[in-house]
Image (spheres, grey):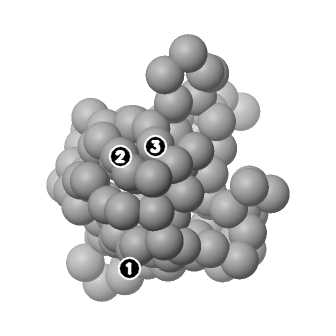
Amino acid sequence: QVQLVESGGGLVQAGGSLRLSCAASGSIFHSDAVGWYRRAPGNQRELVAEITRSDDMNLAESVKGRFTIFRDSAKDTFYLQMNNLKPEDTAVYYCNAHWTINDRRLEVWGQGTVVTVAS
């Protein structure tokens, strides 16, 4: 089974930037999509950014213009570039990859990486 490992979280001042990385232990090239989710304290997990197999990109309204997602298929790694960070971006960020097999959604998650944005 493919495993995902995130890196790149940390503490940053408001207005700063971070790049999160998600490295897969196996091929994710044929996945339906890869993406990033986050869960802030007291909130539900929400989709932040997703890129599909056909390179369509979906971004949450709250991060449009500030975040972007991209991948390096040769390295089975994808990234979340976060610019102009705000305190409300503080959360645990999780990467995700999913496939549809026999009409069932199969997915894998990373362990999470903490992003803290200080005001």
Q: Can residue 52 be seen in the rendering of this structure?
A: no
- Return the residue at label 2: 116
103 with respect to 44 (left or right): right
Q: Is there a contact, CB below 8 Å, between mark 2 and mark 1?
A: no
In the foreground, 52 or 118: 118
Judge by depth and name the residue closer to the eye, 69 or 26: 69
- Numbered disc 1: secondary structure: helix
Name the residue rendered at 55%, 57% in the picture: 86
Image location (x, y in percent) of residue 59: 72, 62
Check the image and report above or below for 79 versus 90: below
Q: Position of residue 5 (x, y in %)?
A: 22, 49
- Asked whether the residues under the numbered discs 1 and 3 touch, taking CB atoms below 8 Å apart as contact, a structural biologist would say no
Between circles 1 and 3, the one closer to the viewer is 3
The single residue placed furthest to the top in the displayed view is 42
Q: Residues within 10 Å of mark 2 (few under 14, many from 20)?
A: many
Q: Amino acid at mark 2?
A: Thr
Residue tagged by mark 3?
A: 90
Badge number at residue 73: 1
| Label 1 Cα crowd, 10 Å radius (few <14 / some 14-19 / many 20+) | few
Q: For mark 3, give the secondary structure.
A: loop
Please identify the residue farthest to the front as the structure is shown. Answer: 119
Going from N to C along the chain, the mark reached first, 2 or 3, is 3
Q: Is residue 26 left or right of residue 70?
A: left
Residue 116 position, x and y percent, is: 35, 46
Identify residue type, mark 3: Thr
